[in-house]
Amino acid sequence: MAEEESLIYTPTWAIASTCGVFILSSLVVERAVYFIGQLLVNHKLKALQAAFEKVKEELMMVGFISLALTLGQSSFSKICVPTKWTTTMLLCNKPTNDTTVEESMTLAIRGLQETESTEAADSSICKEDYSLFMPAENLHQLHILIFVLVTTHVVYSLVVVALGMWSVSQWKAWENRAHMKEELSIHNEVRLTRETTFMRAHALNRWKTNTFILYLVAFFQQFHNIVCETDYHTLRYGFIMTHMPNNANFNFHKYIQRSFQDDFKYVVGISPGLWVFSLAWLLVNVNGRESNIIFTAVPLILVLAVGTKLQHIITKMAIRFNDTYPLTVGMPNVEPNDKLFWFNRPKFILFCIHFILFQNALEISFDIWAAITFPPDNCIYRHTGLLLGRITIGIVVQLLCGFVTLPIYALVSQMGSNVKKAVFEEHIQTAVRKWHKHAKARIRNAQGIGEGSSSKSFCAPQAVEDEHRLIEDDPSQDDARSVEMVVYSS
């Protein structure tokens, strides 16, 4: 039978057509990847290019894992371990005496052929009281799981960031109106702080001084007027007055878009830490424990917690300003501060979003894998309704993350104590990096010829002059003023 099924006795038309299907599908994927990369290059979206490289690295990682599993399948399928080891920490426990007669008959009929083939393989390879460590069929199923996981994570990451970028793009009209208001100077009158629209929405109710109620209100606010125009104008004004008061025409919307694209690089891809987490998740998933509907809801709970925290930051900024300044000229000048964020680190929110996307992809991919690999009567999902419920939770998490959490994050994450490098256009960033490189080189050269510390005070201003000359050659005056301010302040 084995000789009859060998490739050497297979029709050549079957071999050629099978190879042709795989080659054609691979070429289509390769051309699609190349087209997307060229599209990003033509539009000079370097941040998105870096993020796309992360996606390609992830796909390449899958290729290496697939190759390793294929090459190592024959070796792994011959490893024998004591039989008692193979009966502990099972993904699904085997049926016991408590199983009903109908369930036992069903399981017996479906598993009889597999059991006989496994026992035959064990007896031919392993000695008595020993069993195969990982049979060839199990390796194939594991191969499918890894492929489904990475594919789901890539698709989820692209979809959720596309939704977030689309939501942020809708704020362009608000930015244009903000510039019109500044030109008309309609916000220069002195007003009571509590009478401003922003304060009425976030800081006037005295019961909001209670921390628990404050978070409770923030929880529901993330679903109502996710980011309203008043919040955008107020946070924009506070950012500009704190970090660049001499550049009132700063385009805050473009800055948010550049910053969001930079953050995209950290959201996509699977880091070594996340791979370790996935291994730990699989290790403790004994008897389908992690497939319980409660554990499936963990990404949903986390994404709601992040959205609540971001809304709480906006409210906290409003309360602090209202308590400090009873009068305001124009819009409230809220103060950005790292202390408003968890662990005083705005970047921690981005880490949470990255983890949520991966955890959600892991949960959903495991459910899909179980549905296409195992019969319905297993511990991973008892019936189709439970499986559909878990997949629905995963879709809800993606929609919440794309339409609610990411837009709030894109705005509120700018309220840290420091500006991000995205404050400069790409060509300005390149000029600043050149200035920094040349300044360090001059300082090293000056120290090398024995000019001592006095050389440092000469080289840095000279480097600044060189950098100003680079900036003057560029037509972007707004960005030039931003660079000039940052260079002098540093």
Image: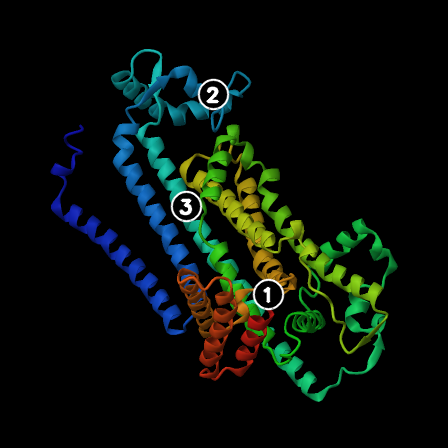
Is disc 1 placed on a helix, strand or loop?
A: loop
**Residue on which disc 1 sits:** 419
As displayed, is residue 355 above or below residue 294? below
Please tell me which residue is depicted at 38% across the width and 36% down the height of the picture: 142
Horizontally, residue 188 falls left or right of residue 342, namely: right
- Between residues 80 and 257, which one lies in front from this camera angle? 257
Q: Which residue in the rendered view is the most extreme toward the top?
A: 128
Is disc 3 placed on a helix, strand or loop?
A: helix
Q: CA distance from mark 1 to mark 3?
A: 38 Å
Label 2 CA crowd tier, 10 Å (few <14, some 14–19, many 20+)? few
Nearer to us of marks 1 and 3 is 1
Nearer to us of marks 2 and 1 is 1
Please tell me which residue is depicted at 52% across the width and 40% down the height of the picture: 384
- Model colouring: rainbow
Q: CA distance from mark 2 to mark 1?
A: 53 Å
The amino acid type, in three-letter code, at marker 2 is: Thr
As displayed, is residue 338 above or below residue 436? above
- Between residues 224 and 451, which one lies in front from this camera angle? 451
**Residue on which disc 2 sits:** 88
Please tell me which residue is depicted at 86% across the width and 56% down the height of the picture: 207
As displayed, is residue 290 above or below residue 337? above
As displayed, is residue 17 above or below residue 162? above
- Where is residue 417? Give x, y as percent: 65, 61
Residue 392 seen in render? no
- Where is residue 243? Give x, y as percent: 64, 70
- The label shown at residue 148 is 3
Please tell me which residue is depicted at 28% across the width and 33% down the height of the picture: 73
Is disc 2 placed on a helix, strand or loop?
A: loop
